[in-house]
Image (cartoon, rainbow, N blue to C red):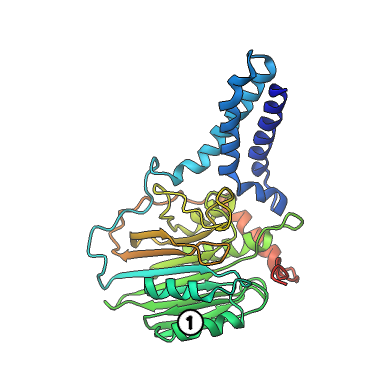
């Protein structure tokens, strides 16, 4: 009985590992990008339990081979988000409170979560230079307004469809803009932040569509890749942050990094799993910050539970322009062509975004 169970579990591990290799932008396929850690755990259990099967029969050996293959393939994707990998962003060795540092709080509040007190307490404790809140409806806007009055400027784009967004800055803003890049119901925010030392940083806050098992992921992928192309041509130091509804190791996120030239400070440090905050064994890195080569890392932390299904993420970056970081690979011609195709396809479509009824 044990050998049969082992081979079934190992088969599930291997199938779940191979499905993401399919170049198909569909939620069912792309959802297998998310659970790599869980598949690794199951494969490790199969390997650990296999001695209990007794004799090394062909069935047991087949189970071991499939589980080992799944574990190794998954490890290739996950290893770069551990201390065993080279850090893409170097640590800043200067004064963390200098005029050329900027701190960012990115927090998906979950629209249906009404525990405003926890979010406000965290905001007041961290005192970020820039705070980005996602899934903010009118109730969240009103609840946060008193705390955000301490900021120099706040951009409100509250919506009741889980795509609302608020960006608040303690520093002066220029060229502030709420943009609907590919869907008239999915906003993003772009602005230029002035640092105390006189230098300027551009920030783009994103919250594209989630992947659903019965829909394609073109909306999400195209928005992420459109911002990648924009980032590639940006002359100012740049930060891109938000809940991208995609994991750090996915096909789309890796393509985003190659096209944009931006860096991921988690590489070489840790996973920083931010979703799902409610279930310890069902988590992956869904909330991101990417930055241009001009920055070094001062602080990167996952924050405490605030009632949402996402943990807030807090970052502090130092603007140095020393260019000591490890740059991503250059984009291939395939990267550029597929990005253009995804963007063009999504621009030609007129449809409601995914997931607008989740909080009903």
Residue 322, image quadrant: bottom left
Foreground residue among 114 and 129: 114
- The location of residue 358, given as percent across then percent down, is 70, 67
Task: Give the residue displayed 41% in from the left and 82% down from the top.
Answer: 173
Query: Under tag 1, what secondary structure?
Result: strand
- The location of residue 43, given as percent across then percent down, is 59, 33
Q: Is residue 50 above or below residue 209?
A: above
- The location of residue 339, given as percent across then percent down, is 61, 57
Q: In this image, 269 relative to 67: left or right?
A: left
Residue 89, image quadrant: bottom left
Q: Residues within 10 Å of mark 1 (few under 14, many from 20)?
A: some
Foreground residue among 220 and 167: 167
- Which residue of the protein is positioned furthest toward the left in this rendering? 94
Task: Give the residue displayed 35% in from the left and 64% down from the top.
Answer: 317
- The location of residue 7, given as percent across then percent down, is 69, 26
Quarter of the figure with the C terminus: bottom right
Task: Give the residue displayed 31% in from the left and 57% down from the top.
Answer: 323
Quarter of the figure with the N terminus: top right
Write down the residue under mark 1.
176
Q: Is residue 128 visible?
A: no
Residue 208, image quadrant: bottom right
């Amino acid at each position: 009985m044990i050998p049969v169970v082992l081979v079934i579990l190992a088969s599930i591990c291997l199938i779940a590992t191979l499905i993401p290799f399919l170049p198909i932008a569909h939620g069912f396929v792309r959802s297998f990008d998310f659970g790599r850690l869980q598949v690794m755990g199951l494969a490790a259990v199969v390997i650990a339990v296999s001695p209990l099967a007794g004799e090394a029969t062909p069935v047991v050996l087949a189970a071991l081979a499939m589980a080992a293959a799944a574990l190794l393939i998954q490890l290739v994707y996950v290893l770069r988000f551990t201390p065993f990998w080279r850090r893409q962003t170097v640590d800043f060795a200067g004064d963390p409170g200098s005029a050329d540092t900027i701190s960012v709080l990115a927090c998906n509040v979950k629209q249906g979560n009404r525990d405003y007190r926890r979010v406000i307490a965290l905001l007041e404790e961290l005192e970020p230079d820039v705070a980005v809140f996602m899934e903010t409806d009118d109730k969240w806007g009103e609840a946060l307004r008193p705390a955000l009055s301490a900021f120099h400027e706040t951009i409100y784009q509250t919506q009741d469809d889980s795509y609302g967004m608020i960006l608040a800055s303690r520093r002066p803003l220029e060229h502030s803009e709420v943009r609907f890049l590919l869907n008239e119901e999915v906003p993003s925010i772009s602005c230029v932040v002035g640092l105390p030392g006189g230098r300027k940083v551009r920030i783009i806050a994103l919250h594209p569509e989630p992947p659903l098992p019965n829909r394609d992921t073109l909306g999400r992928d195209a928005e992420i890749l459109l911002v990648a192309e924009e980032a590639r041509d940006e002359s100012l130091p740049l930060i891109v942050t938000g809940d991208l509804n995609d994991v750090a190791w996915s096909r789309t996120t890796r393509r985003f990094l190659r096209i944009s030239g931006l860096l991921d400070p988690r590489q070489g440090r840790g996973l920083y799993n931010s979703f799902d905050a409610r279930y310890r064994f069902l988590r992956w890195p869904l909330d991101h910050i990417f930055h241009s080569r001009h920055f070094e890392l001062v602080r990167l932390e996952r924050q405490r539970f605030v009632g949402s299904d996402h943990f807030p993420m807090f970052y502090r970056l130092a603007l140095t322009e020393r260019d000591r970081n490890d740059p991503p690979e250059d984009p291939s011609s395939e990267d550029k062509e597929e990005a253009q195709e995804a963007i063009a396809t999504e621009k030609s479509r007129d449809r409601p975004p995914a997931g607008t009824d989740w909080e009903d």
